[in-house]
Amino acid sequence: MSESAAACVLTSGGLDSAVLVAELLPQYARVFPVYVRSGLRWEEVELHWLQRFLNHLRDARLEPLTIMTLPIEDIYGRHWSVTGDGVPEREAAWDSVYLPGRNLILLAKAAVFCALRGVSTIALGLLEGNPFPDATPSFLSLMAQTASQGLAHPIVILAPYRGLSKHEIIRRGRHLPLDLTFSCISPVGHHHCGRCSKCAERQQAFAQAGLLDPTAYAHAP
């Protein structure tokens, strides 16, 4: 069964991937949102908000959310993303949130998913200035080549927001329920903590976009 007019979107429930899903719907006959569970401490909350956001879209071209598993706790060990200890706070350096090999892992799993369904396009919401080694155009190109060869199936990896900043994404998606997106790495219940570096990034982006931040924070900024 061929799905040449289909795309797979790696979704986290964050602002960037949520807007990306919505913007790809008019461009493809079918859009497959894919979430990969790796054992990171915020995943249950991400999935809660991601499903709510996707339910809101109500588009026949949107396939049900696919949740896959590729555990990484055995590699990360006592990393803050697994334990919740030492989560980067508001003033932390930009590279403190780096998750080694994250995109490599996600893309490998998504590529197999696509090959088994005849889908050739994988999209992810990488932004301008992302300096991590598995987010560069050269890496994405090589990863697509490797996946295509290893799976005997053409794979194209798209990062259409690579030239955009987060506040530009917010402006593009201002008609969407952005309050149903989730960006926090230290959630309090189902809410953003308001204190971690990702919450700070979210707050700053809404301010730069000139829009009211609709996010419910456990601790007011």
Image (spheres, rainbow, N blue to C red):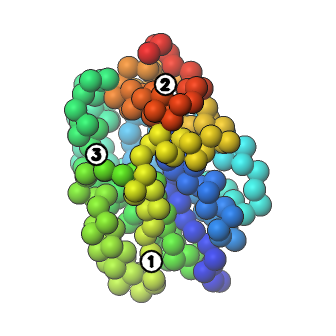
Q: Note whether 33 is above or below 75 in the view shown.
A: below
Question: Would you say 14 lies left or right of 86 here?
Answer: right
Question: Would you say 205 lies left or right of 7 here?
Answer: left
Which residue in the structure is indicated by mark 1?
A: 155
Residue closer to the observer: 64 or 24: 24
Say which element carries label 3: loop
Q: In the rendering, at what x and y percent does residue 192 appear?
A: 49, 25
Question: Would you say 119 lies left or right of 54 here?
Answer: left
Residue plotted at (43% across, 70% down) = 157
Q: Distance between the residues labelled 1 and 3?
A: 24 Å
Residue plotted at (45% across, 83% down) = 154
Determine the image quadrant of residue 90: top left
Is disc 1 surrounded by few (<14), some (14 to 19) or many (20+) residues within 10 Å? many
Labelled pair 1, 3 in contact (Cβ < 8 Å): no
Which residue in the structure is indicated by mark 3?
A: 99
Can I make out residue 76 in this image? yes
Disc 2 marks a residue whose amino acid type is: His
Of the residues under marks 2 and 1, which one precedes in the sequence?
Answer: 1
Q: In the rendering, at what x and y percent does residue 185 appear?
A: 39, 31
Screen quadrant of the C terminus:
top left
Q: In the rendering, at what x and y percent does residue 116 appear?
A: 53, 76
Residue 192's disc is: 2
Residue plotted at (56% across, 37% down) = 181
Disc 3 marks a residue whose amino acid type is: Leu
Say which element carries label 2: loop
